[in-house]
Image (cartoon, rainbow, N blue to C red):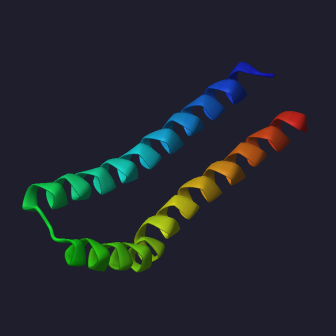
Amino acid sequence: MSVELIVFLVILFIFTLIATLRIFKQEENKLKQYEQLGDTVENEMNRSKEYETQSLKSNLPILSWIYGVTIILGLAALFIYMF
């Protein structure tokens, strides 16, 4: 493999990893905030239901775009290398 392709794929992997960890950190911060507030069981259930619907609207599309772009760019780099 050419050095340029390897460097490109490593940079692409690092970008994807950082973006995924950033989303994970946002969710972790939310959990810490809820723990500090000392919620009741009812609030936790409501938050859980809200998270299920809200996560599908916010996190899933972002992660889909990140991984979709990564896969497309990775395949494009592979095809450029092959031809």
Q: Tell me where residue 48 appears, x and y as whole percent.
A: 35, 72
The answer to which of 83 and 75 lies nearer the viewer is 75
Residue 55 vs 6, above or below: the answer is below
In the picture as drawn, the residue positioned furthest to the right comes out as 83
Residue that appears at 16% across and 71% down = 40
Residue that appears at 55% across and 62% down = 65
Instruction: Please tell me how many numbered marks the rendered image carries.
Output: 0
- Answer left or right for 44 relative to 24: left
Q: Tell me where residue 38 appears, x and y as whole percent.
A: 11, 61
The answer to which of 57 and 28 lies nearer the viewer is 28
Residue 53 vs 68, above or below: the answer is below
Residue that appears at 54% across and 55% down = 66
Q: Quadrant of the N terminus?
A: top right
Residue that appears at 23% across and 78% down = 42
Q: Quadrant of residue 67?
A: bottom right
Q: Tell me where residue 20 appears, x and y as whole percent.
A: 46, 48
Q: Quadrant of the C terminus?
A: top right
The answer to which of 55 and 73 lies nearer the viewer is 55
In the picture as drawn, the residue positioned furthest to the front comes out as 41
Q: Tell me where residue 56 appears, x and y as whole percent.
A: 48, 74
Residue 31 vs 57, above or below: the answer is above
